[in-house]
Image (cartoon, grey):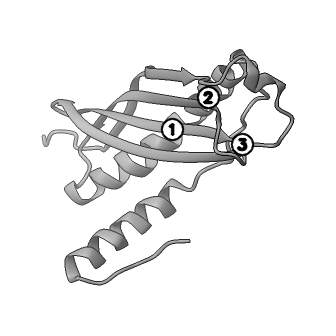
């Protein structure tokens, strides 16, 4: 009888791989009353750990600056997970790692960001949901355009 080749996707472990918080202008920054400009950056990386085992890391960097460019705070969270991914067609592996896994990691990273900012003495930062499929498609289009010598600008 043929070996069972059903696709396998499971979460083996979720963990905070790195957490950094900076409040460079404390304590005077806490006396400011102006609303900061908040900037959010996302990055997803995936790599094999063992046969059928992959680590995916979602890194979120949030910075808040006042109009005069002074930084209130900067927090960076690298939320990682170890996933078992087997019997998936080669062409589908990258989308699973860059869309499916970040969708699982995002709520944990969002909580870590909010908790760190609150513990630093600021109002919580609640990150809006992210469309990882849209981000992935945009990155693929940009990579394709770059190979063909064209340009794509995303607003």
In this view, the residue farthest toward the right is: 33
Residues 151 and 48: in front is 151
Comparing marks 1 and 3, which lies closer to the viewer?
3
Label 1 environment density (alpha carbons within 10 Å; few <14, some 14–19, many ≥20)? many
Q: Where is mark 2, residue-wise?
A: 113
Give me the C-alpha separation between circle 3 and circle 2: 19 Å
Q: Residue at x 43, y 41 (%)?
A: 101
Residues 38 and 138: in front is 38
- Contact, mark 1 vs mark 2 (Cβ under 8 Å): yes
Comparing marks 3 and 2, which lies closer to the viewer?
3
The quarter in which the N terminus is drawn is top left
Label 3 environment density (alpha carbons within 10 Å; few <14, some 14–19, many ≥20)? some
- Contact, mark 1 vs mark 3 (Cβ under 8 Å): no
- Contact, mark 3 vs mark 2 (Cβ under 8 Å): no
Instruction: Say which label, 1 or 3, has the lower sequence index.
Output: 1
Q: Where is mark 3, residue-wise?
A: 66
């Amino acid at each position: 009888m043929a070996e069972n080749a059903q696709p396998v996707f499971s979460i083996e472990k979720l963990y905070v791989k790195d957490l950094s918080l900076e409040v460079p202008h404390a304590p005077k920054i806490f006396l400011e009353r102006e609303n900061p400009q908040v900037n959010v950056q996302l990055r997803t990386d995936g790599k094999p750990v063992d046969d059928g085992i992959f680590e995916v890391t979602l890194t979120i960097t949030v910075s808040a600056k006042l109009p005069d460019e002074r930084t209130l705070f900067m927090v960076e969270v690298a939320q990682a997970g170890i996933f078992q991914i087997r019997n998936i067609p080669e062409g589908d592996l990258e989308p699973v790692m860059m869309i499916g896994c970040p969708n699982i990691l995002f709520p944990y990273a969002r909580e870590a960001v909010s908790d760190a900012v609150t513990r630093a003495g600021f109002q919580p930062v609640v990150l809006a949901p992210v469309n990882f499929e849209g981000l992935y498609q945009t990155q693929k289009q940009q990579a394709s355009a770059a190979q063909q010598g064209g340009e794509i600008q995303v607003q």
